[in-house]
Image (cartoon, rainbow, N blue to C red):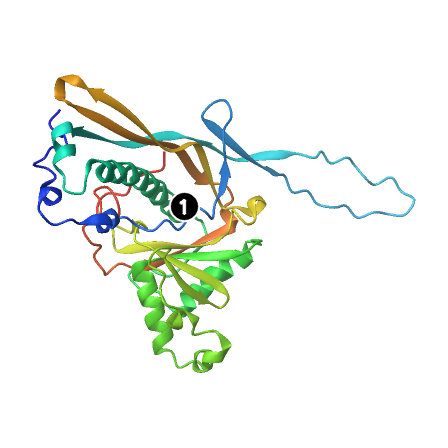
Amino acid sequence: MATETTSTTLTELVQPEIIEQLILDYAIDKFVMLDKVRVGTPGQGNTWSFPAWVKDSGTDFTEAASTFTNDNLETTENATITAAEVGIMRELTDYAAASVKMGEGALMQFIVEDGAALCLEMAEDDLVALFASASSSAGSTGVDCSVADFVAAMGKLNTGKARGPRFAVLDDQALLDLQSAVAASQAAVFANAANGAQDLLRHCCDTDTGYVGSLFGCPIWYSNLTDTANTAADVVSGILINGAARPVNAPIGFVQMWAPRVRELYLPDQVGRQIVTTMCYGCGEISDFNYAKLVTAAKVHPGPGRAGFKSGAPRTSP
């Protein structure tokens, strides 16, 4: 192959300086959605079905009259999600492994951890891409996210009779707009810090989890992986019911056949080895009324990131 990991491709690692664990954090996005969706684990086969009860209605009853008719108890398939494989392969020569100053063991640990992180990042990217599928929408194309837009998106869930604890995942630009709007607002609700409405400004962003505080009782995380819309003029955020906390009301389902796992093959002819990390999953919408999308003007250009994510063409769900 032409993409082997050799002593020359690991230039920084064979220099006298030791980069240690700092290199593990390069361009890896936060995992916000994976622990907030309904998860199904297929037994045999590669699909998982998410059924729901068909809603019936009661009948007016007249005393002493046989006015009832039988209503069948039925279920319907809200979604059937198919799992597919993703992964990454590294081909590492023995010479490169022996040359790095961080040591062969540390290098192998990085390859394994990085492969798992990349697979999980692909899953996260596919999950936040589903925000665009929501029928309920707030915000306008080319317009900054406002406090009113955020409230309107929450109101869409109320109108749809959504049930369960809700949370928001905002694009980084939407978060900036919303925080700026709260900071500039002269509304009395934001004047008194004791009432909690300023939590979005007071909370120190957790850069590991992406949690940034709450607004009007709705906890908020942010993501750099959210997709663009309207020919890249906008970015799409989401306000959702927590499907892990309330599976029966989950808006999004996630099917996993296996978590990130590693396979290794030694190549005698190349005096090296192939290390492959794969993951098998799928995701899709289960319940449309249990989430809403929030459209915000896209002005901040994302960093270099990874090819195929927000800075390039969005990936589609498996």
| Image coords of residue 92 (percent x, y) | 17, 30
The answer to whether residue 278 is left or right of residue 94 is: right
Determine whether the residue tagged by mark 1 lies in a helix, strand or loop: helix
As drawn, 41 above or below 139? above
Quadrant hosting residue 76? top right
Q: Is residue 56 visible?
A: yes
Q: How many marks are shown on the rendered structure? A: 1
What residue sits right under mark 1 in the picture? 133
Residue type at numbered disc 1: Ser
Residue drawn at x 86%, y 47% as measured from the top left:
62
Q: Quadrant of the N terminus?
A: top left
As drawn, 117 above or below 237? above
| Image coords of residue 226 (percent x, y) | 32, 51
| Image coords of residue 77 (percent x, y) | 55, 34
Residue found at the very far right of the displayed protein: 64
Residue found at the very far top of the displayed protein: 269
Residue closer to the observer: 180 or 94: 94
Quadrant hosting residue 264? top left
Residue drawn at x 56%, y 48% as measured from the top left:
246
Quadrant hosting residue 267? top left
Q: Classify 10 Å Cα crowding around label 1: few (below 14), some (14-19), many (20 and above).
A: some
Q: Quadrant of the C terminus?
A: top left
The answer to whether residue 91 is left or right of residue 139 is: left
Q: Is residue 144 visible?
A: no
